[in-house]
Image (tube, rainbow, N blue to C red):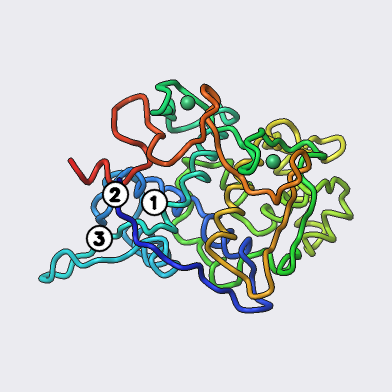
Amino acid sequence: MSRLTTQAPTVLRAGGPNAVGVMLGLLGDEWTLLILREALLGARRFVDWRARLPISNAVLTARLNRLAGAGLLDRHAYQDRPPRWEYRLTERGAGVWPVLLCIWAWEAAWVPEHVERLPVRVHAACGQAFDPVLVCAACEQPVTAAPDQLTGGFGPSGGWARSVPDASTRRRSAGGDAGLFPQTTALMGNRWSAALLGAAFLGVHRFAEFQRCLAAPPTVVADRIRRFCELGVLRERDYRLTAKGRAFLPVVLTAVDWAQRWFHAEEGPALEHVHTACGASFSPALSCSACAGRLCRVDVRVRTDTVTMLDPASRSRR
Ligand SMILES: [Zn+2]
Ligand SMILES: [Zn+2]
């Protein structure tokens, strides 16, 4: 079992970006998602990421520093002269695995023109290929984007204005995109896109209402809606989510759950939902589509080899 640095949640100052805003500032970046994925696959040293990703030194340095600053990676010196560092996943960093798993499954199912062939996921507990299924942690029943499944919405630190990253974390154009998760990046990697997606999941489908939620100029709203229609995430005729758009819900809910676990606004949660079917406060979990057992990080494997996909310890033991 991997040894992870244990941590306490970060307290967010009152009135600032809430957990959703902080999360989008961190995870709404393709390089960051790829760096975390490789960290879960065992990357620890600068050369590991350089060997696995088409990333420049400058971009990698900037992202590693940011992830260390946000408590997702822990920096340790492994050599003094010259100084060399390795970056180990913390509990908070490793906790991103459900989000990455849902992104992986969504891209594999809905983005056929993928530049990188995505390997088959195997659930170690049952030995079968699987898709992650979003369930309610309280009652284990599957949860979809159907309108009657979850009730609730913004909590005490919610609201559109606070659910976007602050200016310092929005500056990240340097380095461009990797092009490995292009559609996920199109949905989450931009404050307007993320807000549009969130509004669509909350049932918004009229232009004026999108504009009110995003608090953006009409040209920006029109541009984002057009892009979502091109991606096949919104229907052209009424701006409602398509099946592909609704299938992104596990990514959104696991990301929000991770954010609210690790970033606590002084006023309370940004989002609060109740699972209608069981009446419990909703928190997401993932189960295996083949055996219906609950998924955990160390049970997710890749068909192509026997390395545990999401357990950093499995590679470091080699
Ligand atoms: Zn439930
Ligand atoms: Zn299974």
Q: Is residue 96 above or below residue 179?
A: below
Picture disc at residue 86: 3
- N-term mark: 2 or 1: 1
Tag 2–tag 1 contact (CB < 8 Å)? yes
The answer for how far apart the CA atoms under marks 1 and 3 are is: 13 Å
Q: Quadrant of the C terminus?
A: top left
Q: Residues within 10 Å of mark 3 (few under 14, many from 20)?
A: some
Q: Is residue 166 visible?
A: yes
Residue 115 on image: x %, y %: 46, 32
- N-term mark: 3 or 2: 2
According to the image, label 1 marks what residue?
35
Tag 1–tag 3 contact (CB < 8 Å)? no
Which residue occupies the foreground of this view, 266 or 305?
266
**Amino acid type of the residue that numbered disc 1 sits on in the rendered structure:** Ile
The image quadrant that residue 169 belongs to is: bottom right
Which residue occupies the foreground of this view, 26 or 217?
26
Splitting the image into four quadrants, where does ligand 1 fall? top right
The answer for how far apart the CA atoms under marks 2 and 1 are is: 8 Å
Residue 289 on image: x %, y %: 55, 25
- N-term mark: 1 or 3: 1
Residue 244 on image: x %, y %: 68, 32
**Amino acid type of the residue that numbered disc 3 sits on in the rendered structure:** Glu
Task: Nearest to the eye among marks 1 and 3: give it.
Answer: 3
Q: Is residue 2 left or right of residue 279?
A: left
Kind of element beneath mark 2? loop
According to the image, label 2 marks what residue?
43
